[in-house]
Amino acid sequence: MHDITLLQLFNDDIGTAQQLLELIDTEFQALSERDLPRLETILADKQPLLAQLGQHGNERSQLLTSLQLSADRAGLTALAERSTQGTELLARSDELSALLERCQTANLRNGRLIRANQASIGSVLGILRGGETPGLYDSRGGAARIAQQRPLSQA
């Protein structure tokens, strides 16, 4: 009975993780285009998927714990050895793990793009505020000396 419940949770989460991966890829496109309204929509769509994955993860852990098994791969393997659905359980667990790993990799990629965009915007704001000036070169290729640095609004 518990093995069927676990299998159903894995199957549900595989679908959820696939949706999440698609949203993360769409988020990358929106970040690249700096499409803030679309990013807000994507974030709103991601939240329930993440909540569901977290809830199902807790349910799987509780099921394994209620069977006096550890809430990890070893516990799942022990259950699979006693179950007629054992092979399917392990296969679905591996599939879900691979999907979640892809989600994490894609999310890290999006984080790098966000940090790059933040640095770029910070640099532009610094120039506009007069705190930073871009590196300028003289005719010999050396750093130019600018006697007085003024904000772009006062130039």
Image (cartoon, helix red, strand yellow):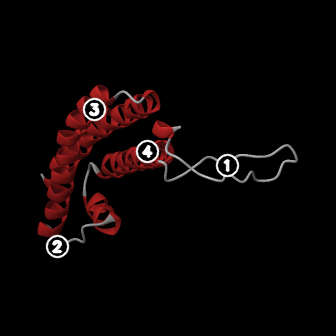
Do tag 2 and tag 4 residues touch (Cβ < 8 Å)?
no
User: Which label number is shown at residue 114?
Assistant: 4
| Mark 2 burial class by Cα count in 10 Å: few <14, some 14-19, many 20+ | few
Classify mark 3: helix, strand or loop: helix
Distance from Cα at disc 1 to Cα at disc 2? 65 Å
Which badge, 4 or 1, comes first in the chain's sequence?
A: 4
Badge nearest the viewer, 2 or 3? 3
User: Which label number is shown at residue 42?
Assistant: 3
* Amino acid beneath label 4: Ile
- The image quarter containing residue 58 is bottom left
Q: Is residue 4 visible?
A: no
Which badge, 3 or 1, comes first in the chain's sequence?
A: 3
Distance from Cα at disc 4 to Cα at disc 1? 24 Å
Q: Nearer the viewer, residue 67 or 96?
A: 96
The residue that disc 2 covers is 68
Q: Is residue 110 visible?
A: yes
* Amino acid beneath label 3: Ile
- The image quarter containing residue 110 is top left
Do tag 1 and tag 2 residues touch (Cβ < 8 Å)?
no
Q: Residue at x 43, y 44 (%)?
A: 114
Badge nearest the viewer, 4 or 1? 1
Q: Residue at x 14, y 56 (%)?
A: 59
The residue that disc 1 covers is 135
Q: Nearer the viewer, residue 13 or 19?
A: 19
Which badge, 2 or 3, comes first in the chain's sequence?
A: 3
Distance from Cα at disc 4 to Cα at disc 3? 15 Å
Q: Pinpoint residue 88: horizontal percent, then vertical percent.
A: 33, 46
In this picture, is 79 found above or below 130? below
Distance from Cα at disc 2 to Cα at disc 3? 40 Å
Left or right for 140, reference 57: right
